[in-house]
Amino acid sequence: MGSSQGLLRTSRGTDSVTPPDLADRWELLTGEVASRTFAKRKDMLKAVGKRPYRGVPVDKDELRGRWMQVRKDTQQIVDMLAENVKMKPDGRVLLPKELIASLISSEASVREGGFD
């Protein structure tokens, strides 16, 4: 047995002793994988930036055009809300605040600009 076989190198660069029990080893490994994955996800989100429409950057004119199509078709609005709804176990229906804010600002810009 080598001297490094009982050590696990963590993401912070420190060595920690690998537990002898199999269940404890798996718990340690899954915790380490989860923390590294979370850190990589955080870096990726920072690199991508804001994702206004399904991860694809969209300019304001295109968003306004999409809203002009959707706002007159009730079924499209219902479908859009159904795609973004989250049902809670207690029966509450939740929608993302960003979605509601974007719908309100889109409608306000249409009404102010007279794009009806």
Image (cartoon, rainbow, N blue to C red):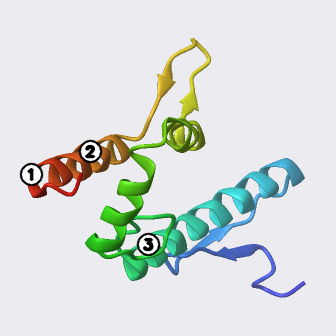
Q: Nearer the viewer, residue 70 or 60?
A: 70
From the viewer's perspective, is residue 6 above or below residue 1?
above
Q: Which residue is mark 3?
A: 45
Q: Nearer the viewer, residue 94 or 20?
A: 94
Mark number displayed over residue 112: 1
Q: Is residue 102 left or right of residue 57?
A: left
Q: Which mark is residue 43?
A: none
Q: Earlier in the sequence, mark 1 or mark 3?
A: 3
- Location of the N terminus by quadrant is bottom right
Using the numbered discs, state the Cα–Cα distance from disc 1 to disc 3 in whole angstroms.
34 Å
Foreground residue, 72 or 84? 72
Disc 2 to disc 3, C-alpha distance = 21 Å
Residues marked 1 and 3 touching at CB (< 8 Å): no
Above or below: residue 91 compared with residue 65? above
Q: Amino acid at mark 2?
A: Ala
Q: Residue at x 69, y 74 (%)?
A: 8
N-terminal of the pair, mark 2 or mark 3, is 3
Question: Depth-wise, is mark 1 or mark 2 nearer the camera?
Answer: 1
Query: What is the secondary structure assignment of the residue under circle 1?
Result: helix
Is 82 situated above or below 20? above
Which amino acid type corresponds to the residue marked 3 in the rendered image?
Answer: Leu
Q: Give how far across and how far down residue 110 sits, in percent.
A: 20, 53
Closer to the chain start, of discs 1 and 2, is 2
Which residue occupies 44% across, 50% down? 70
